[in-house]
Structure formats: structure tokens, C-alpha cells
Amino acid sequence: MTRPRIAALFAFLVLLSLALVMPATSQAPKSGGVLNLMLREDLPQGFAIHETATISTVWPAMPCLNNLVLFDPLKKTESVDTIIGELAEKWSWQDNFRNLVFFLRKGVKWHDGQPFTSRDVKVTFDMLRETADAPAKLRINPRKDWYANVEAIEAPDTHTIVFRLKRPQPSFLMLLASGYTPIYAAHLPPASYRTGCIGTGPFKLKEWRKGEYVEYVKNPDYFVKGRPYLDGLKYYVVVERSTRQAALQAGKLDASFPGETTKTAAEQLKQAVGQLVVTPFSQNVSDNIIMNVKKPPFDNPKVRLAVSYAIDRRALVGAVHQGGAVVGASQAPKPWGFWGLAEKDLRGLPGYAAKPAEEKERAKKLMAEVGFAPEKPLRVEIVTRAIAVYVDMASFVINELKQIGIDAALKQIETAQWHPMATRGDYQIGANLTGIGPDDPDANFYENYGCGSPRNYSQYCSEEVMKLIDVQSQELDPTKRLAMVYAVQRRLEADAARPILDWKLDYFTVWPHVKNLIPHQSIYNFGRMQEVWSDK
Amino acid sequence: MKTYLAQRFVIAVLTLLGMSVVIFVLLRLAPGDIVDILFSTAGYVSPAEKQAIMKELGMDRPYWVQYLDWLRQVVTFDLGKSYRYDLPAWQIIRPLLPVTLELAALSIVFAVLLGVPTGVVSAVRQDSALDYVLRVISLAGLSMPAFWLGMVIILGLVTWFRWIPPLSYVPPTEDLKLHAVQFLLPALAVGYRSSALIMRITRSSLLEVLREDYIRTAWAKGQSGGAIVWRHALKNALLPVVTVIGIEFAFLIGGLVVTETVFNLPGVARFLVQAILWRDYPVVQNLVMFIAIVVILSNLLVDMLYGVLDPRVRYGD
């Protein structure tokens, strides 16, 4: 056979295999149909995404709203390269990543018919930054720290908006692309989003029947032609987990709730209904240990380090999550996240070594140095939220600590008391879960490790680390920034600032007729539903 | 009769007043409040912002002022505003009431239809094989929690029919058949337990009556077995049964939490638990008062029925 013939045959085989593989993915989207989705609780703060951090609000509120920019709903990976425009048609960095200029879409209307302008954007972000001249104020503002680097926001005309930053921050765009960053209507009070939703999004709120469901209909005036594909969305509040699972199994619901389906649950569902499609992805939620560095005995770095050495992360993943989690440091590891330390880099850090018995010996030595041993244990109280996922993890940790001479008694704290207690630092040691919006160090480091941040529960504060965090935040070269982020993570683990135990995976489950509902690296960013269609 | 009713009314008002104090105090003794919960959903706490929200919701006022304000609202039929939803509490509570009342009523009807006849048969055929079978069935009903039975029903439906009842309330005006199915299944789960209780009470009460002299006289006079049991004995045996039915109905109004949750019915009990978890004081206080009123009314109804069933019972003036 001649070379051209071999090449032709090869090309034919490639095309043939593509033709065989592609039909499912290259199907032309169909319009129509209603998607039935689940909620595990009623919307905690209505549609007021800016006043909450829970997925229970973000997931059902996202279809009503738009951001300036968003992570491409059709791509699994979230990075600066996968950001697409929503209300912003174009954007450009100027003055060496100090000014970010957005050129807004024209002709966009709010669901009540009012025109969308740059004033809406300015009012939203001034409100988030809590500027003195902000015309509105949020009741609760959990992400104010995200905008600490914004010096001013200007609206030179009705369709241009300029963010002036105090220092370069290339990942600022990542924060704006998160599901946490929608634009509110300036002509409405922010409180109105607690009871209803006037957005610019692909779906208009039809009805929110309290404790029962949230119903949306297609926005016929949506600014993206031909979208959304679906005629409507209905989110049912189903409090009981087994009823939710039964409803999914029965086909009453089309998809699981993000962050809800464990590996075991997904296996059970798949066993019951073979055609269900399960996609594992990172929840961007970590199990971690918070130790109050302001109070004895955890003001002593040796004790904190001993705790970190003592916990066998891999055993925890196996025992508590049945393999449905991965070991990582303070950023989710690849391929689930972008910035996390790789397995080989973790090996040298406290608690991550391949031989856990050796790690426990190190922990015992450290405890002995401060005068404690298994026969003469340090008695502490370990707090955790009175929710099964927290308690299971805490129980495992207690057993690990016992082996190195820390006798920890479990104290379960009701949800109402958990955050007040953690923020006040009214505890010694705790088993905690931390969720992060976009997979970016700026969204994580400042919030959870920054000096004085209300979500820095362990109250760890290192000027040196803060400098490193600031430097990585300003770095324009992605490769160099990655190296810096690795360095910060190593330092945080070495200081046992908030030992990370694992990163939880979700096994997002949908019926095969649900198309284009693609889970991302974080549960908080893929709920827009603009591209989703039903092949029923 | 009028005096009796007036006395009962005064007692009811005093009971409700006492209840209101208990509810109000207990709710505030529970750790945390709505503001803590709101901050919980945001993952942090700011003392200054917390104070501002407390003020906005009127929670910074002295407790006695808050209590009197609530009483004033109840008397004027203005139930205040839900802290969680920022809407009038009545607007939240109103759609829940028919759901729970219908489910409780259906459960009781089911329980009576099943419990009374089986209790009679069991008593009449005392110590027969049928009696033992019926007693085992009733014992199973008492031992089986309603929520467990509910869950078994749901799982059975999913496994065998790949179907479960609707996930939101279907009004009868919209689809009567689906509405009936939506309520009959949970009513079956709840009613079975209640029927077991009713069956046992009916049986023991009827056995006692069947040994009375006047029943022996009726037998001696040659009356038919059916007439003796159904006309003479059962009527007199029903007093404790009616008491139990009344208690069960009152219990069900607040006790359907798990059944409403498992079958995803938007009723009072399920909502009450959520409201308690959210420390939504106006909603919790008013829902508990509603339950208290139903309990008082059903007790009054039972007491009135005594007079109908037993002519010896008199309500003295």
C-alpha cells in the first residue's frame, strides 16, 4: 500500500470512529420541555445570592440572573481561558492588570422591562464593597473581602464600566465569573431579592411556593438568541434524602443536587437504574481541622503539627467517603482542581506521607515534647456541626488523635450556633467543611487564611504568608503564579494553619435526556441552565 | 349546656394563654436565633450587622414587649411577619392548614374503618384463630413507625412501578385522582398505626360490655347476635374508642412530621420543624397555637359526643 493510500485509510478510520462516537455529543439541541430539579431545603435567603454562601440559594437563583462574565457552562474546567461574556460583550485589561474595562451588551432588559445599564453594575459592586456613597446596603455581605483590591468603579457611559484596582490582580476576573457574582437591578432594593427575583437571566421567576417549589419560565426577551432551550425549570423542595433519591430513580426529577450524591449513593442509583449518567466532579469543598491558635493548647505550633501528622488522610478518604474524595492541600488537586499540590509534592508535608505509622510516631514525639502521651493524654473538646457529614469525619479524627495522646471528646454544635461559635473563636479544635466558589487561590486564601478575615476560624495570621498571598495574587505569569501558590500551600500545611484532610467529590447524576448540564470544578458555578436542553 | 360551654371556653382561653407563655419562653431558651442562622448561610458572623438585623426584626426589644406584641397580633388576627421569608406569617401558614387537616382526617377515617370492625370481630371471636391473626396485625401496626411504613411504601413503589406520588401539592380542583392518590398513601401509613390502637381499644371495651348483665338478658330474650353486638353492645363500648379517636386526631395534627416529610407533603408539621430549625418565631408560635386550638376543639367535640352516645352523660347547667 502506498503512503497516500495508508494516509487515506487512516483518515477514513478516524472519521468513521468519530462518526460512531460523536452522535451523542453532536446532537442538535432541541427546544422545549421543562426540567425538574431538586432542592434539599427551601431557599434560605430567597434569590439573594449576595447575602449568602450556600448552594441552596445559588443553585436555584442562578437561572434568573446574569454576571458580567461567567465560566463557560459547556466546559468542565474553570480558568481565565474558559470565561465567556454574559452582560459584558467584551472586556480588556489595561495598565498592566490594574484596570479592567467591560463593554456591556446593549438592548438587555430586566425581567420587569427596565433597561440594563452600567449603573446596575456600579451599584451592585459599590454595594458589595460597601462604599460610603453606595445607594444600597446588603443585610449580610459575606464576600466583601473579594473586592478589597478595588479602588474605584467608574461608569463613563451607559454601556461601559471600569474597575480600577489598587494593584494588579489578574484573577479578579475569576471572582467575577463565579456564580456568587450576579448583577442586581439598581432600580430595586437588594432586599427584594429575598422574596422574588427580577434579573436579566434566561429564566423568569413564575412562582416560589414556600417550602414547596420554585418555578421558572423561559425569558422570551433573553439577550442570547435561541436561548434558553428549555421552556421552564421547576425546583422541588424535598427535605428527606431518601425521597429525593427515590424521586430521581422514578424519573420525577431529572438531576441530582450538586454536592449531594456520594459515591455510595451514586452506585446504588446506577444499580437501580442503569441508564442514569453519573459524572464525578470536585465539589471544591474540603474537610479540614480548625485549631484555635489564640487559645491553649493549640497556640503551641507543636501540638497543631502533631494533630496534622496524626491524621491519615488516605484512610479517611477510604473509611468516611468510601473513596469518594481525594487527598490534597489547601487547593483542590489536579485533575479536580487546577492549583492543588500534586501527590508527589504532598508527600513531604505533615500528614501526607505514604507510611502513616511513621507520621504517627512523629506526632507522638511532638506530643511528648509538650508533655503528653497516650497513657497521659491531652484532654480537649472537638467541636463539629451536628450534621452527619461533619460528625462522621470528626469521629474518624477522634480515633486518630487518641493514638498519639490526644483524648478528644466530641461536641456537636447545632447549625444556628456553629458559625457564631467559630467566628468568635469559642472553641479549641473543630472538624470543619469549607466550600470555595471559584477554583482560584484569591477566592480561598484571603477568605480562609487572611489576617482578620471573619471566615479565618482558626485565627491563624502570618504576615509572611500574607505577603506571599499578595505576591501570587499580583503575578501576571501563570507559571510563576502556580509555583507561588504551591509555596503558599506548603507553608500553610507546614504551619498546620488549617490542616486539609481531603477534597470531596460529587457524583452528579442525571437522566440521559438531560443534555449540556455539565458539572464544573465547583458546585457554585454551573447553575445558569442557559445551554441545557432536554432530549425527551 | 350553655354554662358548660362557657366554662370550657374560659378554660380553653386560659390553656391557650398558658401555652403561649410556654411556647414563647421555650423558643427563646433554644440556643441561637434567626440572625445566627442567616449568618450561618453566609459562613461568618459580624456583630455590628447582627445587631442591625436584630433591630430590623424587632428582636432587640425586651422579651415582655415582644410577647405582648404577639398576643396583640393574635387577638387582632394579624400573625406578624415571618422572619425567614419576610412575608406575613398568615400568608405562609394558610396553605399548610388544609393539607394537614385533610391528611389527619383521612388517616382517622381509615383508622376507624379498619380498627372498629376488626376490633368487633376480634372481640366476638375471642381466642379464635381469626382473633389471633387480627391481634398480630394490630400489634404489627403499633410496633411499626408510620414513617418507616411510609418509606417502605415509597421504596416499594419506586422498585416495582418506577413511580412515586407527586412532589408538590396537587389541589383536588386540578386533578382529583392524583390528589386522592397523593393523600391516600400517607393516610394509609399513618392510619394503619392508629387503626391498630383503635382495634385494641374496641376489642377490650367490647369484651367488657359483652359480659354485662343486660347483654346476657338480650341473649336470653333470643335477640340475634348481630343486633346484640352492633346495636346494644358496640354503642356502649364506643366511649373509650371515641376518646382515643379524638386524642389520635389531635396528635396527628402536630405529629405528622415524618410522614409529611417522607411523602413531601407541604403540611403544618413538616413546615413547623423547618420553622423551628430557622428559629422563625412568628411562624412557630402561631403554628403551635393552631395545633393547641385543634387539640382543645377535638377534646371538646369528644366530650360532646359522649352525650350523644351515652344518654346517662349530662352537661349540667
Image (cartoon, grey):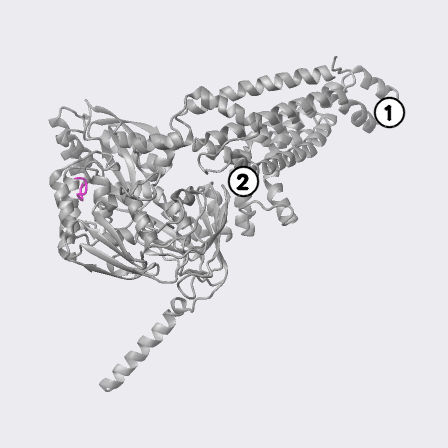
* Total numbered badges shown on the rendered structure: 2
The relative height of residue A118 versus residue A303 in the rendered view (above or below) is: below
Q: Position of residue A493 (x, y in %)?
A: 17, 41
Quadrant location, the C terminus of chain B = top right
- Depth check: B158 or A334 in front? A334
Residue at screen point 32% across, 58% down: A158
The answer to which quarter of the image holds residue A106 is bottom left
Q: Which one is nearer the viewer's eye here, B59 or A387?
A: B59
Residue A294 in the magenta stretch? The answer is no
Using the numbered discs, state the Cα–Cα distance from disc 2 to disc 1 in whole angstroms: 51 Å
Three-letter code for the amino acid on which mark 1 is drawn: Gln
Circle on res. B266 = 2
Q: Amino acid at mark 2?
A: Pro
Q: Disc 1 designates what residue?
A: B223
- Label 2 secondary element: loop
| Residue in view at x 11 percent, y 27 percent | A369
Residue B125, how many percent across, how many down?
73, 27
